[in-house]
Structure formats: structure tokens, C-alpha cells
Image (cartoon, grey):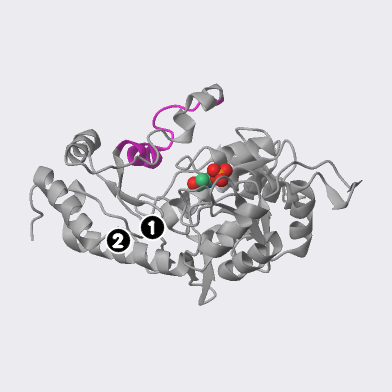
Amino acid sequence: MVETFEQEFAELCQARFAIGVSNGTDGLRFALMAAGVRPGDTVVTVPMTFIATTEAISQAGARFDLVDIDARTYTMDPERLRTYLEHDCVRDPKSGRLTSKRTKGPVTAVVPVHLYGQVADMDPILELADRYGLIVLEDACQAHGAEYVSRREHKRYRAGSIGRAAAFSFYPGKNLGACGEAGAITTNDPTIARACRLLRDHGQSAKYMHDIEGYNGRIDAIQAGILSAKLKHLPAWNAQRREHARRYAELLGDFGERLILPYEPEWSQSVYHIYAVRVRDRERLREHLNEEGIGTGIHYPVPLHRLKAYEHLGYREGDFPVAERTGAQELSLPMFPELVAEQQHTVAKAVQGLLGRPPL
Ligand SMILES: *Cc1c(COP(=O)(O)O)cnc(C)c1O
């Protein structure tokens, strides 16, 4: 069942290999280790993500540096990455190796996060990574089946087939969810695939033949079986989510800056894991919708650099203003495949009940 699911999932992602693992966090850790991130290295990611992204980096023995997100897509801002590489790092002119001024460690990898179901703008990120010799690993834990149109290659890519490797989560709430914990790594690189297979299973190359010390990070066969059954429906479910997003935009109307709807650039086909809107007085709208019987979420109220867990790193308010504003204003409206038009009408009515009708 595990092998069958791995094959099916690799196909969905248009990647050569998929390796089933215990969860998305372990998947990201194994991918980092297998791709060559070493203890003491520095890995660049974003402050607007679930903490699992940086947990995996720390668990691989590395440290992280952060670059802010784009104000419209909420994914890694390639310009911020450029500024970071040019100004916050030192490059050894002989070896070309990059050192972070903050961590004093070698910068070896970048982890863009495909947030809310939308792939980060990978073209400029890959270009910068090429120039600086960095490994790119996708945190695709929210982006099963999402697509990215590469302008430089005139080619459509599926999430999970763009970087050296990618991590997916099948936590029950994700677009493809198990009945419990599960995850996967995808890659086109046979060496990385093999290393991930060792890492997830105590380093075993054959029964009781342990080539390295690994982890207990396998996927359960029963989860793989459930995921195989559900995978067949994923394209239809993602299409339904996209249709709901289109209808929300139509029903809610254009409030301009007062209610900012998700932005999907022409190079992206999002799978709307989350339908994230931004509103200045979020608590008021959240309460109002709650009173109308409409549940909402917040993803994520506190950016990583402001979490207690990372207090010791000495970041301050204002360090990543776009992530901070997004964290303060983001509200997730109901989004799931089974959502029906009538429910979306109810949501839109309730939003307009508070904000008024949008100007034409
Ligand atoms: C869900 C998620 C993870 C972690 O996945 P788990 O399966 O819960 O370990 C990592 N990164 C992001 C962005 C996620 O949304």
C-alpha cells in the first residue's frame, strides 16, 4: 500500500519519486538532511508560516534566517531574498561560500513555503539560489496539486517538482488528509530519494542492515491505503476549492483596501488550502461572523519571529513588517470542497452586513 501510494502521489506531483513519511515536519527534516544541509548550516525561510517549517530546520541541526513575504501573495518575496543575500551575508571571494552575518554560519539552503495553497514565485528564487549555490526545498505542506507557471522556462510545474525536494503533509485538515498523521517527500533526485528512505526507517538498507542512524519516520500502511483512496478525488476537490474562491470574489465584491481578497498572479494556480482575506479590524469581523454562526480561522496570528519559542533570537517588532501586518489582519473564511453556493451567499451577506455593500 505504501509503494502504491508513493507511486500515485509522485505522479500527481509530476515528480520522479515520492517517499511516504510519518508527517510533514519529519518530511521536511529528512529532505533537508538528505539534500545535504548539515548541522551548523543556515537555512533561509519566511516568518509567515506554521512553526513546523523552522522546527524541521532546527531538528536538522541547522539555524534559520528569515526574509519577509510579498504583500500580495504572502509567499517569500524574491526581492527580500536578494537583499538578504547581498547585504545580510558575506561571500568568500575564493570559494564563493556564503556566510550569514547574523548566525555566522554557512548559508546552504532556501525553503520557500507555498502558503495557503499557492506556490511561491519560484523563478527568481531558483535564479538567486543558482547564483549563490543554495539548495531549494519546497515546503509544499499546504499545496497538494498546486501549479506554477515558470516564465523563464515557459513550462507548468506542479508543487513538489520544482525544488531539489519538497515536503507534503497529510494532516487531516490538509487538501489531501489522512485519518491521522502522514506526510511525503517528493524529488527528482534518486540520491535524495534513497537517503530519505534510509532516514525514515532507522537507516535500514535491508532488514537489520543499518547503514546510518535514522529515525522512526515511516508512513503507516493504513494511512497510505486511505490516502490512495482519497487521492483519486483530489483533482476534483481542488477544482471545487478554486470554484469556491472564484464565487467568493464575485459575491463579496470589491472593497478595495477595506477587505483584501486572495491574489492569484497569472503564474499561479492555487489550490486554496486556506481562503485568506485581510481586514483591518479583524477581531470585529471575526466576532460578527461568529455571531452569524460562521466559523473562521486565523493563519497565523503571530509570525515566527514574534513567538515565545524564538524570543532568544532577539528579533523585534518591525523586523518583518509585511508578515506582521498579515498576521494582524488575516482571516480565513470557510473553504472546503463540500462548501455550497448558498453557504457562500450567507458568508458574503454577513461580511457585507458589517462592512456595508462594496462600492460599484
Ligand atoms: C501542516 C504544515 C507543516 C507540517 O506538517 P505536519 O504533517 O503537521 O507535520 C509544515 N509546514 C506547513 C506550511 C504546514 O502547513
Position of residue 93 measured from the top left corner of the image (x, y, whole percent):
72, 49
Which quadrant does the N terminus fall into? bottom right
Q: Is residue 136 left or right of residue 282?
A: right
- The residue positioned 50% from the left and 57% from the top of the image is 176
- The residue positioned 67% from the left and 66% from the top of the image is 4
Along the viewing direction, whichever of 99 and 171 lies nearer the viewer: 171
Q: Judge the density around disc 1: few (<14), some (14-19), many (≥20) Cα neighbours within 10 Å.
A: many
Along the viewing direction, whichever of 349 and 300 lies nearer the viewer: 349
**Image height of 337 relative to 151, above or below:** above
Number of disc labels: 2
Q: Which residue is mark 1?
A: 272
Position of residue 292 measured from the top left corner of the image (x, y, whole percent):
17, 41
Along the viewing direction, whichever of 234 and 88 lies nearer the viewer: 234
**Image height of 242 relative to 196, above or below:** below
At mark 2, the secondary structure is helix
- Say whether residue 323 is magenta: yes
**Image height of 325 relative to 351, above or below:** above
Q: Which residue is mark 2?
A: 245
Q: Is residue 29 left or right of residue 69?
A: right
Q: Earlier in the sequence, mark 1 or mark 2?
A: 2
The amino acid at mark 1 is Tyr
Q: Which residues, given as a range, are shown in magenta?
A: 313-328
At mark 1, the secondary structure is loop
**Image height of 159 relative to 279, above or below:** below
Quadrant hosting residue 5: bottom right
Q: Judge the density around disc 2: few (<14), some (14-19), many (≥20) Cα neighbours within 10 Å.
A: many
Q: Is residue 80 visible?
A: yes
Which quadrant does the C terminus fall into? bottom left
Q: Is residue 135 visible?
A: no
Along the viewing direction, whichever of 96 and 155 lies nearer the viewer: 155
